[in-house]
Image: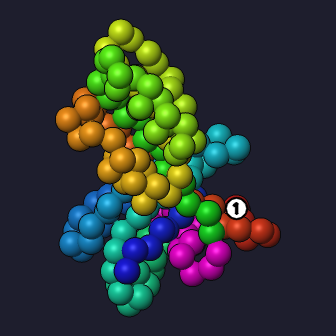
Amino acid sequence: MKHIIALLIENEPGALSRVVALFSARGYNIESLTVAPTEDASLSRMTIVTTGSDEVIEQITKHLNRLIEVVKVVDLTEGHYIERELMLIKVRAVGKEREEIKRTADIFRGHIVDVTEKTYTIELTGAADKLDAFIGAIDRAAILETVRTGASGIGRGERVLRV
């Protein structure tokens, strides 16, 4: 089962590598990882997407809480949450394809952020299945490059991750 684990960690050198080492040493896989500073410059928020049974996720959470740099850990999938992913995709767009690709990007609420004579670069945000559906809707041969951030998540309503 997929889990989205959100952490607040001290924003200092080596903190990220210790979290990753914890996963590696125990044979847990990280499907995606995003890290960025929070409104408090001394803290960073890390979002880890991983898979495992409830028992495995409980072990991961316990191990994370033991790390000195970790301030707080929350498994977002234990409650209601919002998940988004960002994708930048560069596609070949020449001749009649240009209008078709633009129309498809509009349907998926994507934004064309760069245009050349032969390419479009499109920015899309949403759940992973939406981004996968966009890739499926366009000609695979037209895809030149794809960059995805992995999931970021936040609890819904009054549920917050803060110290």
The answer to whether residue 79 is left or right of residue 90 is: right
Q: Residues within 10 Å of mark 1 (few under 14, many from 20)?
A: few
* Residue at 38% over, 44% down: 148
Residue 96 painted magenta: no
Relative image position of residue 65 (x, y in whole percent): 49, 73
Considering depth in this image, is 81 or 97 the residue closer to the camera? 97
Q: Quadrant of residue 132?
A: bottom left
Mark 1: amino acid: Arg
Magenta residue span: 66-80
Considering depth in this image, is 40 or 5 the residue closer to the camera? 5
Using the rendered image of the protein, determine whether residue 63 is visible from the camera's viewpoint: no
The answer to whether residue 110 is left or right of residue 121 is: right
Q: Quadrant of residue 32?
A: bottom left
What is the residue that sits farthest to the top in this orientation? 117
* Residue at 40% over, 74% down: 2
> What residue is shown with label 1?
162
Q: Is residue 27 above or below residue 68?
A: below
* Residue at 38% over, 90% down: 55
